Amino acid sequence: MSPWFPVLYLVSELVQRDDNAYVDEYFEEYEQSPQPDAHPFILVHKLSPYAILPQQKSAGAARFDLAASQPCTIEPKGQGKVSTCLIMEIPWGSYGRIATRSRAAWKLGIDVGVGVIDCDYRGEIIILVFNHSNTPVTIRQGDCIAQIIFENILMPDIYEVPDFTTTTRGKGGFRSTSQTPAIFSKLLPKEKHAVSVLVEDTLPQENLVEVHAGTTSPGVFVLRSMDTSLETFEEEDNLLDQISYMTSITHPMEKVDQLIWDYSDTESDMEADWVNPFATEETTQSSQLIATGYEIEYPNMRRLVESQPDQ
Ligand SMILES: O=c1ccn([C@H]2C[C@H](O)[C@@H](COP(=O)(O)OP(=O)(O)OP(=O)(O)O)O2)c(=O)[nH]1
């Protein structure tokens, strides 16, 4: 046997134990339940013996019938909440949509409203019923007055964008040419951008920023200075801290000898918090562009850039 065998075995054990440490309660429960990859399932809990499990009346039916667990009457042109006494645990990434049954709509003149059952909802499922007829509608216990359809959904990240990609169908009627920098119209929502920070002790010359931007790789933004954004991004403090940190590790202090961050004439505590790791009091250089090695997703980048004056 190889003399390394016991060592390898030990490492393997440690990794395994480490993995287990990260399994939280939810996943333990999840793994104990029926196979997640197998046929989908809905866990249903009855709050009353009068509750009736959702029933699929034929193998190909999209719907499962939902029954009232208690009798009730809906007044003409009125609305009512019909109790099902059911709680459902719907799989993550899907939801239940309660819909009207055509028979109930046609025969009784009732309609079901709202009907979105979230997968994280653990309350009783209620059927909101509207009576469009001119006579009272009596619902008996056990009447299947609605249906529920389980549907997969997207759970996307939402990004606000100033413009969209063009399509053959679209007419471009929603394009905005407001003060938005032209670069934004070319960005994809998830695109990330390298950040360069222009550190300076005075306001830059108008063309200085453009010159610097032009010499950096495409997509690199130049923040005119960090101090202006600090005022408007209170909630983004940690983002700016991260940029500051990334700047410090991208450019160790000894390699940069001519740089100033002069916040001596400002009153803001927040600005004073931002410590430029390269500042030297002896130097007379007024500004320097630093590639931070930090990437920002489009929405944050947009907000940061738009917070700069004279963009
Ligand atoms: O016809 C319905 C509609 C909703 N619900 C339950 C399930 C759903 O997950 C929850 C919340 O519904 P919704 O999001 O439509 O209500 P809301 O008024 O937006 O309240 P909330 O802020 O709690 O989401 O209420 C029903 O039982 N029946």
Image: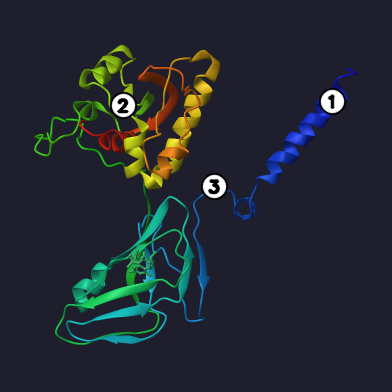
Looking at the picture, tell me which residue is in the foreground, 265 or 17.
265
Give amino acid for label 3: Ala
**Callout 1: 10 Å neighbours few (<14), some, many (20+)?**
few
Residue sitting at x 41%, y 76%:
84
Pinpoint residue 201: horizontal percent, then vertical percent: 35, 26
Indicate the secondary structure of the residue bearing disc 1: helix
Please state if 4 lies on the left or on the right of 300 as rendered.
Answer: right
Picture layout, residue 281 above or below residue 103 = above
Looking at the picture, tell me which residue is in the foreground, 60 or 39.
39
Give amino acid for label 2: Thr
Give amino acid for label 1: Val
Q: Quadrant of residue 158?
A: top left
Does label 2 or label 1 sit earlier along the sequence?
Answer: 1
| Pointer 1 with pointer 3, Cβ within 8 A | no
| Pointer 2 with pointer 1, Cβ within 8 A | no
Mark pair 2, 1: CA separation: 60 Å
The mark lying in front, picked from 1 and 3, is 1
Provide the residue designation for mark 1: 7
Res 202 seen here? yes
The mark lying in front, picked from 3 and 2, is 2
Q: How is the image coloured?
A: rainbow
Provide the residue designation for mark 2: 202
Image quarter in which the N terminus is found: top right
Indicate the secondary structure of the residue bearing disc 2: loop
